[in-house]
């Protein structure tokens, strides 16, 4: 799977206490027939060469995702609590209430944990919402436990090596009945940045004052009392954030890092540093009074699933901004569902997600294994409980709005994984993206201070935190925000009617290039509150 953050540039929380039964228990003899757990084989195997087996003594970690209970009831709760026209609107639930009604049962956790422990694996942790059981062991132990073999491969499209399970994992029927997916048997998932940088001698690009003026948010306050989470796979340097705030006289509090699975990149950020810093700075530009939590996870499917679950179980934020993603065809069903289930919990608690829709137009897999010959969309932006954010080309006169046209890199199209949700017409019964948009063209980009210098950034990586910052200004939890955004029927939006992203053309109303368009902040906030 190819995964990348969505930017173009020019110029741990402590582990939860585990139930005793989940940490210790008798070995379980395997007496039942084995059942395959589908959706757990990397799509990259179809264009990769196998070179041999993984060394039997290789130490590995695998996360086993468990199925949610009462899924139909959960979907209805999310739709009702997020719908301004429902009597249940705003009646979000707590993590404890979620566990009681929808999380896997403790008996399911015990069944899975005891079986895996009986195969010689070590149960390293169980997530607080009981959705994920993480186990450690050797390659030999994992192959035996999951009834598969592990091979060493070379991806001939991306020209890189990885390991993967050769076939779907298999488990005894009673264990398989509660297991949704097995993540970590392959390490093909790698985040790729999608940026080009150009240093500027002085701030160049849209500034906080311009953004507030152009998108009409000056009357909405500062976002005080709200907390925004950033979904990251790299780190940042506080000095760069301070330099940005000082330049534009922002009184934002310093961001706080939340480590997931012991990841913390801040002491030595990698190539994604610019992505993390632009996310922080754009959120602070729009909502300087909001607090910012930077969740940092390992660069893997496991890291993404664990981060989503930690955000949901922490329940400390009202909105999440995501600027990293992968094209759907490169992503295993188990990885998508494991993350999506955690997002469902978070939206049931009232947390909104805004995710970049991609920078390769209608062909989201252009830079990945699948290639640019087919139309594809980006995950997590394609998740029905996530607001996918596309990109525009913005023109302005000072602090006044001029016009917007579609940016040709704006990710958009039709999902191959998700059915059309109730709020959306869809195409051939499938969900379409994006839902909304804002400026993303690097030629009309944002002034960002990163890695010790000024740069101009564009890409849907910038559009996602723009919408997350606006959501913080609204000042109330929106939950699965698409319910309210689509319900506004274009009120409070700048409708973008010109331009294309390749296969799709912008037009009046909703389209698969810019969604409903960008926000007119004051008008849309009034519609969402009304």
Image (tube, rainbow, N blue to C red):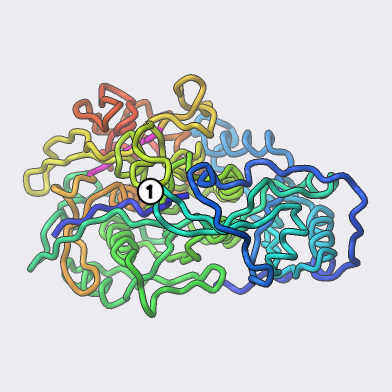
Left or right: 170 as drawn, with respect to 447: right
Coordinates of residue 278 in the picture (x, y in percent): 28, 61
Task: Identify the residue at the far bottom of this view.
Answer: 267
Residue identified by numbered label 1: 471
Q: Which residues are magenta?
A: 433-439
- Above or below, 28 against 331 in this view is below
Q: Is residue 238 above or below residue 39?
A: below
At 37% from the left and 35% from the top, the residue drawn is 434
Residue 60, quarter of picture: bottom right
Residue 434 counted in the magenta span: yes
Q: 156 or 219, which lies in front? A: 156
Which residue is drawn at the image coordinates 17% and 45% (left, top)? 214
Left/right of residue 55 with respect to residue 263 in the rendered view: right
Pick the front one: 20 or 352: 20
278 left or right of 371? left
Specify the principal SS of the magenta part.
strand
Among all residues in the image, which is located at the extreme front?
Answer: 51
Residue 489 is situated, as x and y percent measured from the top left of the image, at 37, 26
Name the secondary structure under disc 1.
helix
Q: Residues within 10 Å of mark 1 (few under 14, many from 20)?
A: many
Q: Is residue 366 visible?
A: yes
């Amino acid at each position: 799977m190819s995964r990348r953050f969505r930017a173009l540039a020019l110029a741990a929380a402590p582990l939860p206490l585990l139930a005793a039964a989940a940490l210790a228990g008798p070995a379980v003899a395997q007496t039942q027939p084995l059942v395959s757990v589908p959706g757990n084989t990397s799509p990259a195997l179809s264009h990769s060469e196998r070179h041999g087996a993984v060394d039997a003594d290789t130490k590995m970690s695998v996360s086993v995702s468990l199925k949610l209970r009462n899924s139909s009831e959960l979907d209805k709760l999310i739709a009702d609590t997020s719908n301004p026209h429902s009597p249940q609107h705003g009646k979000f639930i707590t993590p404890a209430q979620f566990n009681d009604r929808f999380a896997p049962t403790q008996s399911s956790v015990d069944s899975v944990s005891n079986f895996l422990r009986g195969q010689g694996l070590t149960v390293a942790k169980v997530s607080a919402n009981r959705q994920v059981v993480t186990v450690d062991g050797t390659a030999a132990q994992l192959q035996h436990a999951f009834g598969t073999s592990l091979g060493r491969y070379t991806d001939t499209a991306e020209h890189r090596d990885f390991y993967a399970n050769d076939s779907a994992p298999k488990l005894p029927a009673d264990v398989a009945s509660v297991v949704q997916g097995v993540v970590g048997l392959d390490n093909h998932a790698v985040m790729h940045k999608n940026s080009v940088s150009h240093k500027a001698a002085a701030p160049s690009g849209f500034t906080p004052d311009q953004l507030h003026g152009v998108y009409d948010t000056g009357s909405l306050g500062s976002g005080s009392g709200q907390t925004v989470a950033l979904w990251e796979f790299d780190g940042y340097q506080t000095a760069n954030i301070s330099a940005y705030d000082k330049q534009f006289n922002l009184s934002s509090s310093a961001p706080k890092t939340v480590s997931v699975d012991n990841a913390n990149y801040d002491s030595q950020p990698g190539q994604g540093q610019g992505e993390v810093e632009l996310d922080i700075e754009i959120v602070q530009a729009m909502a300087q009074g909001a607090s910012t939590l930077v969740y940092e996870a390992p660069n893997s499917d496991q890291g993404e699933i664990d981060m989503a679950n930690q955000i949901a179980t922490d329940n400390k934020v009202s909105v999440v901004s995501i600027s990293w993603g992968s094209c759907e065809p490169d992503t295993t069903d188990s990885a998508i569902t494991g993350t999506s289930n955690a997002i469902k919990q978070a939206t049931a608690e009232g947390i909104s997600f805004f995710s970049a829709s991609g920078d390769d137009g209608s062909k989201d897999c252009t830079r990945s294994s699948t290639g640019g010959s087919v139309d594809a969309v980006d995950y997590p932006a394609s998740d029905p409980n996530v607001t996918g954010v596309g990109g525009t080309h913005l023109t302005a006169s000072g602090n006044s709005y001029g016009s917007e046209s579609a940016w040709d890199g704006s990710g958009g199209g039709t999902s191959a994984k998700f059915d059309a949700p109730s709020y959306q017409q869809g195409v051939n019964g499938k969900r379409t993206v994006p839902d909304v948009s804002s400026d993303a063209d690097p030629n009309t980009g944002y002034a960002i201070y990163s890695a010790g210098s000024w740069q101009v950034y564009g890409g849907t990586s910038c559009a996602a935190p723009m919408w997350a910052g606006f959501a913080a200004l609204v000042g109330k939890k929106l939950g699965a925000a698409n319910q309210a955004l689509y319900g506004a029927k274009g009120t409070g939006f700048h409708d973008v009617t010109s331009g294309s992203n390749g296969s799709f053309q912008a037009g009046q109303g909703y389209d698969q290039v810019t969604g409903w368009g960008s926000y007119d902040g004051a008008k849309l906030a009034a519609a969402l509150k009304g």
